[in-house]
Amino acid sequence: MLLKNIKFNTLSVFIFSVVFIWFFFYCKHDPLLSEVNVFNADPYDAFGSIAVQISFVAAFFSILRLIIANLTDIQQDYHLLIILRGNLVSLLSILVTMIADIIAMVRYMRIWTNSSSGIILFAIVISFMLLAVILIFWTLKLDLSKKIRIRYNVFSLKNLWSLAGFIVIAFYPVPGSFKKSILWAIFTAYLGMAIQIMIVRNLAFLIYPPEEISATDLISVMNEVYLAVKSRFIFLKPFFDYVENGLKNRKAQPLISWLNPRKYRWNLIILIILFSGTALAFIEGIGEEWIGFTKKSLLLFSVYLGGESAIILLFYGLFGNYLGMVNKEQLVSSDF
C-alpha cells in the first residue's frame, strides 16, 4: 500500500514539474501575460530558469528509482527514501520560485493590478504555490508513515540564511543608468540562481537530514532499468548486443573509465555541461536570431553556456550525494 501511495505521489510530482515548465515559458511568450509578467527579469527570472531544470531532473530521478522499487524488493526502503528526497527537492524548487514570483508581483503591483491579465497571472502563481505546498505535505505524510525521522528547527541558522535570500530579492535595487551594464545583468542572474538553489538545499536538508546512505546509486539504477527494458523488448536484442559489444571493446575502455563518475567525479559532468550549455545557447540563439560571430553573439553564447554550467555544477555539487547519484565506493557494474 505504501509503495502504491509513493508511486502516485511521485507521478504527481513529475507531472507537476512538467506543467511548471509549461507555465514558465508560457508566461514569457504569451502576448497578454508577458506584458504583466514582472518576474520575467532577473533576479526573479533566474529563480525560474534554475527551477524548471532542478524540479524536472529531481522528479525524473525519482521516476527511475520508482521503476526499480516497483520491479524488485532489493533495497526498497533505501529507494523509497531517495524517491521522497527527490520529490521534496523538486517541489521545494517550484515553491521557492513561486514565493519569489509573489515577491516580484507585490513589489511591482502598479504594473499588473489594473489589468485582467495581471489578475489571472497572480491567480495562477498563487495556485501553483498552493499546489506545491499540498504536494509537499503529502510527501512528508508518506515519509512519516515509513517512520523516517524528520528534523526541522524553526530557529535554525540555515532558516535565517533562507530568509536572508528572500530579503535580498525583495529589496534588490532596480537597475539605474549606471547599472545597465552587461556585467551587472550577468551578476544579477547568477545571484538569483545561487539564492534559489541555496534556499532549496537548506530547506530540503532541514526537513530530510542529509545522512549518508551507502547503497545503490543512480548508475546502478539506470543499469537495472536497462536490463528490465532488454528483457521485455526481445526484438531489440541485436541492437542491445551491438551496444554492449561496443562498450566492451578494449579501445573504448579508457574513455569509459575516464567518464566513470565513480572514479572521476567531475569528468562526465563537465562533458554534460559543455553539451547541454552549447545546445541551450544554440536554441536560444536561433529563437532570438542572434546566432553568428559578432561580439553580441559570442557574449550571449558565453552567458548561456556559463549559466547552464553554474546550474549543473550547483545541482550536482549540492545534491549529488543527497539524491544518491553516484556512490564512489561502489564497484563498476559489469551486468550487461
Image: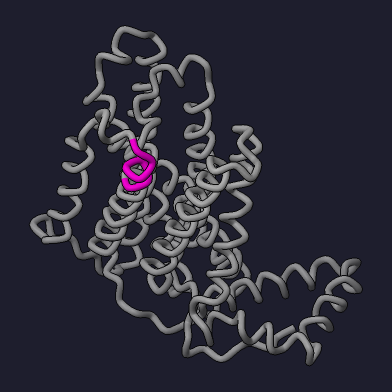
Q: Nearer the viewer, residue 278 or 160?
A: 278
Total marks placed: 0
Can see residue 8? no
Question: Magenta span: helix, strand or loop, mainly?
Answer: helix
Q: Residue furthest left?
A: 155
Q: Residue at x 61, y 84 (%)?
A: 258
Q: Nearer the viewer, residue 140 or 270?
A: 270
Question: Horizontal and vertical percent for residue 196?
Answer: 32, 49
Above or below for 254 versus 284: below
Question: Horizontal and vertical percent for residue 231?
Answer: 79, 73
Instruction: Examine the image and state in which quarter residue 247 appears.
Output: bottom right
Q: Residue at x 87, y 77 (%)?
A: 242
The C terminus - image quarter: bottom right
Q: Residue at x 25, y 18 (%)?
A: 109
Can see residue 197? yes
Span of residues in magenta = 181-187
* Residue 102 in the figure: left or right of residue 159: right
Above or below for 112 versus 142: above
* Residue 231 in the figure: left or right of residue 95: right
Question: Horizontal and vertical percent for residue 184?
Answer: 32, 42
Above or below for 99 versus 34: below
The question of residue 184 being in magenta is answered with yes
* Residue 154 in the figure: left or right of residue 14: left
Above or below for 111 versus 105: above
The question of residue 57 being in magenta is answered with no
Question: Horizontal and vertical percent for residue 139?
Answer: 37, 53
Q: How is the image coloured?
A: one colour
Q: Residue at x 39, y 9 (%)?
A: 116
